[in-house]
Image (cartoon, rainbow, N blue to C red):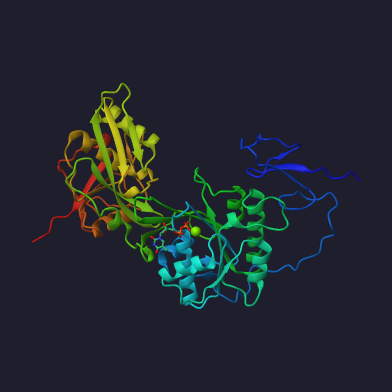
Amino acid sequence: MAKPKTQFVCQNCGTVHNRWAGKCDGCGEWNTIVEEDPMGGIGGGPGKTPKKGRPVALTTLSGETEEAPRVQTGISELDRVTGGGFVRGSAVLVGGDPGIGKSTLLMQAAAALSRRGHRIIYVSGEEAVAQVRLRAQRLGAASTDVLLAAETNVEDILATVAEGKRPDLVIIDSIQTLWSDVVDSAPGTVTQVRTGVQAMIRFAKQTGAAMVLVGHVTKEGQIAGPRVVEHMVDAVLYFEGDRGHHYRILRTVKNRFGPTDEIGVFEMSDKGLREVLNPSELFLGERNAKAPGAAVFAGMEGTRPVLVEVQALVAPTSLGTPRRAVVGWDSARLSMILAVLEAHCGVKLGQHDVYLNIAGGYRISEPAADVAVAAALVSSLAGVALPAERVYFGEVSLSGAVRPVSQTAQRLKEAEKLGFSSAMLPASSAEIPKGGRKGWSEIEGLPDLVVDIAGSARKLGKAPEED
Ligand code: TYD
Ligand code: MG
């Protein structure tokens, strides 16, 4: 039989090439093509002479599972993001910029779980035992039973965690430091990272221990190493935040066992990360309600309402092409709102520079922010502050109509909780009967700066107190 040819596989996208090349045709990345043996090894296809299979025992879908499938940390912001706790036998990848607080978060999670009687192993590949201990002291976690090891060799780690009672959770900090004897390439290369991660995932699936893998993020914002790692794990969480601000957001990017649009909000203090149970208060904390160009957006992050201030500055320009700068929102969407305001509302911004900022370094991805952005822009252009007690939400379409968005009732409830008494929202919001939801009634004739976009927005205010 012919000797199987070796193949050259791109470590970034998985494209198979016949010969080595500096650049992959598939994804355009440089230096990602590695020679692999198709007969075996990681990423190899099925061999030419398949071994004789061994029948595995078939089972049914029903049947007793002896323990809770999830391990909950009791840190509610973290449990929400994972969808109710770490799932046993699953692998979770936690990505984030260096220094954002991944090790801090996981050390706190480890301590919390350990206090609940779980067996937790923390494997640090980046810091020495003394450094990890120092951090644990600072976090008040030093007295817990978290088991610690400073190790980077995959085989040694596996032998360590497999010894004794099965751990409930294993934390590997970080996958970039893992290296295996099986692979020739240097530690930190994609092949090493991939092999290490695969071995860890296999351990999790075989033993039922939950596995948390820490991964660094490259300048482009991707988890360093092959994208394949993201496909291999069950959940991917990103820990992000602005260096200029204290708060950090844990975001689900992928989750096989829960929703993917949840966020957890934390604040970095001198004693580690503190949960922020009401993010709206944080984002609206430094608000100056009397300044023109600021509108409060009633947004949603997953199941949770988040109120945040949208700030706009519109200033006459001397440049031929006016400047448009956006922080925390999509710049293409801003252009769209500007175009709609010009075309349908007679708001001329062609001779003005436009700057848009979301307060607190927060990022909005919801289209529901359109109306808030439009309100902030018009307010800044007119130099008149918007009513301080009003929130804004609704999606603006190119025709100038304001489209309904989901979870209207929840947005209004949160606004009410924070002391707001009126709202501008899509007229056709199904969840609100005409006349308003409890305590909110339609208010007419209030001077408002937003030219009621094509008449499709609606104002709601609290019903006046009855004597
Ligand atoms: P770390 O968890 O080491 O980040 P990562 O693992 O993502 O690289 O966090 C490092 C930063 O957090 C560092 O700049 C110091 C800061 N920090 C605090 O402000 N308070 C604390 O209690 C701790 C432990 C860290
Ligand atoms: Mg770290």
Look at the image and tell me in which quarter the C terminus lies.
Answer: bottom left
Kindly tell me whether residue 139 is visible in this rendering.
no
Residue at 76% from the left image edge and 66% from the top image edge? 56
- Residue 275 is left or right of residue 22, and the answer is left
> In the image shown, does 332 or 227 lie closer to the viewer?
227
- Residue 63 is left or right of residue 446, and the answer is right
Residue at 49% from the left image edge and 72% from the top image edge? 113
Outermost residue toward the left in this view: 467
Numbered label tally: 0
Q: Position of residue 136 (x, y in %)?
A: 45, 69
The vertical placement of 25 against 36, above or below, is above
- Residue 362 is left or right of residue 284, and the answer is right
The vertical placement of 397 against 233, above or below, is above
The vertical placement of 155 against 118, above or below, is above
The quadrant where residue 3 appears? top right
Q: Position of residue 45 (x, y in %)?
A: 76, 48
Q: Position of residue 326 (x, y in %)?
A: 35, 38
Residue at 66% from the left image edge and 36% from the top image edge? 24
Outermost residue toward the right in this view: 1
> In the image shown, does 164 or 131 lie closer to the viewer?
131
Q: Position of residue 328 (x, y in %)?
A: 36, 43
The quadrant where residue 202 appears? bottom right
The quadrant where residue 235 appears? bottom right
> In the image shown, does 107 or 305 lie closer to the viewer?
107
Kindly tell me whether residue 246 is visible in this rendering.
yes
The vertical placement of 165 against 442, above or below, is below
